[in-house]
Image (cartoon, helix red, strand yellow):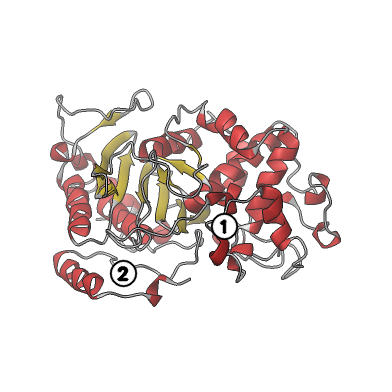
Amino acid sequence: MHKLAQSTLVIIAAGLLLILMLSAPLVPGDRLRSGAAGGGILATIAPSATSEAGGWAGLFAPDPSATPTATPLPEGLAIATPEALGPRGQAIDAYLTSLTDARLFQGSVLVALQGRIALARGYGMADAARGVPNTPQTRFRLASLTKAFTAAGIMILQQRGLVDLNASICTYLDDCPELWRGITVHHLLSHTSGIPNYTDFLDFEPTEMNHTTPDALVARFRDAGVSFAPGAAYAYGNSAYVLAGRIIERVAGRPYADFIRDEIFIPLGMRGSGYDVSMGGYSPELAIGYNNFDEPASFIDVSTLDSAGALFSTVEDMYRWDRALAGDQLLGAEQRTRMFTPGLRDYGYGWRITRPSGLLMISHPGDMTGASTYISRFPEVDATVIVLSNMYWADAVGIGDHIANLLLGN
């Protein structure tokens, strides 16, 4: 499904208004459902921005009365309210407020630089019918940002000597088709397995609201053959990450959701994160999914995505995740290096690794019915942008990249 296939007079008018107000990427990109591994181009980011007058140091202004968010964040991190920010931080908030006013965005955003949270704020509504606004603690469906957690789960097991990335997936899976014997765990995580993407099958969208099981998901593509020899090409999809989740379950001896909770969420203090078990409609604990600003989206039961897209989180928890990936709290240097090493089409394990304008960017989008999400990390300058939206037509990638330009650009 392509987002450019739909257009409304409201969006066109709002887009024209914002073009006059800001230089920003406002039109949703042509993205695949459930998280295409795309990403915007940050043409103006320059690594030398810190050395210029009025650079990143001007983003923050001291404010001893600044109010911290309700959920405790990693020790040593400071929070600045938008009112306490310098010109760049104020520009980010003004940009997001303008998008919200134009009905082009709703969700929550967190922006951090060098261990300080510059902005953690919600925009628009989590549930318009109940009058619940989005906040930094709102829980959003992550869509394909789930894949980074699944990849980390595999790397945790690899770190413990329980998974060999170069071993055939049939080493860890029961009743493995003969055509899969040449596919390794590495091929799954790097989208080079050749296994067709079941969410592209014609029967997926008409059944996405129906609850299912991991075994039933695998059955959808088990006998679909392969599109190319393992390692010969890159093809982004969800089938491989469903299988990666099955490997975690087989090796760890417990359900995928329990493993991610016990090995990642609990150790990192991610209390607002979990595996979404909503059936038949959105849980009141989660943001309601919308198509446009106030048009509710049809419900998707994320058991149909499982380890490729079933997790939920908050922007604050995603920053805890970011901080863990920046150090040794969860994975050792060897595992993080392997995960963040780009392969075909710049994809590592659950992340896309690029260098727009020479600055290392580790990022991933998520995209599914009722959600549009994006995280971009800039390790060389310790900057992070997290965009979680409960609005399908929000251009989370374009918004996130424009925020990064405002944060780091000249």
Report the side of 268 relative to 157 (left or right): left
Give the SS element for disc 2.
loop
Please tell me which of labels 2 and 1 falls first in the chain.
Answer: 2
Report the side of 42 relative to 192 (left or right): left
Q: Which residue is drawn at 75% across and 39% down?
A: 250
The answer to whether residue 248 is seen in the rendering is yes
Local packing at callout 1 (Cα closer than 10 Å; few below 14, some 14-19, many 20+) is: many
In the rendered image, which quarter contains the C terminus?
Answer: bottom left
Report the side of 296 relative to 222 (left or right): left
Question: Which residue type does callout 1 highlight?
Answer: Tyr
Question: Which residue type does callout 2 highlight?
Answer: Val
User: Label 2, label 1: how many angstroms apart (C-alpha)?
Assistant: 25 Å
Give the SS element for disc 1.
loop
Q: Say which of 60 and 79 sits in front.
A: 79
The residue at which mark 2 appears reads as: 27
Q: Residue at x 70, y 45 (%)?
A: 246
The answer to whether residue 341 is seen in the rendering is no
Q: Say which of 224 and 357 sits in front.
A: 224
The residue at which mark 1 appears reads as: 347
